[in-house]
Image (spheres, rainbow, N blue to C red):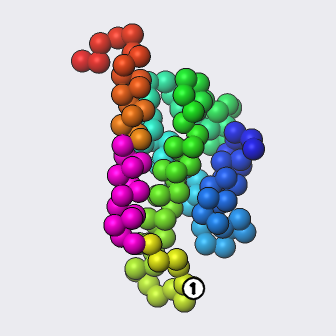
Amino acid sequence: MSSDLSGFLSRLQHLLNDQAAEIWSQSLLEECLRFALQELQQVCPYPLQISGMDDASQTTLDQEISLSPLLLLLAQQQALSHRQVQRSESFHPDPMKQIDPLTRGCRRQELKDEVEHVRLYFLQRSPTTPY
């Protein structure tokens, strides 16, 4: 798969089991990727960008460690949360897979822990004092 915006969008659609874009629109998935990128940018010392998103010419996610899988998982979680809110605001006749709220909460905590591991990775390897 390519490491540009279209490649990330297709991988995210595959993770969400929505290859035909029937549930999540391209623009919504782009916003989910943008949200995930901002969340990772908070713990990463170098600028993160995806080729094709916001006039970026190259993808700079996997320089020191591979952040692409974590980015996709964060974007997937954001898309699922958006869908849950959307479904609770109005009636949707299409059935959604039932996910136990405890499982969903554990999944969010696992992703937060993984982001914290990334933050500690960069903090421990930083040549400057963090304060």
Q: Is residue 101 magenta?
A: yes
Residue range highlighted in magenta: 100-113
Residue farthest to the right, as pictured: 1
Quadrant housing the C terminus: top left
Prevalent SS, magenta region = helix
Q: Does the segment drawn in magenta span residue 62?
A: no
Quick check: can you spot residue 39? yes
Answer above or below: position of 112 versus 20. Answer: above
- Within 10 Å of disc 1 (Cα), the crowding (few <14, some 14-19, many 20+) is few
Q: Quadrant of residue 45?
A: top left
Q: Position of residue 79 (x, y in %)?
A: 51, 61
Residue 86 placement (x, y as % from top left): 45, 74
Q: Is residue 26 visible?
A: no
Q: Which residue is mark 1?
A: 94
Above or below 21: residue 111: above
Dividing the image into 4 quarters, which one contains the N terminus? top right
Residue ID at (72%, 69%) = 20
Choose between 103 and 36: the one closer to the eye: 103
Numbered circles on residues, count = 1
Is label 1 in a helix, a strand or a loop? loop
Vertical placement of residue 28 versus 86, above or below = above
Residue with the most extreme left position: 131
8 sits to left or right of 116 = right
Q: Residue at x 62, y 58 (%)?
A: 15
Q: Residue at x 45, y 38 (%)?
A: 40
Which residue is at the front of the view, 1 or 52?
A: 1
Amino acid type indicated by mark 1: Asp
Q: Looking at the picture, how far across and down is residue 69, in whole percent?
A: 57, 43
| Residue 95 place in picture, x, y as percent | 54, 84
Q: Which residue occupies the foreground of this view, 66 or 43?
A: 66
- Pick the residue in front: 63 or 103: 103
Q: Left of 19 or right of it: where is 37?
A: left
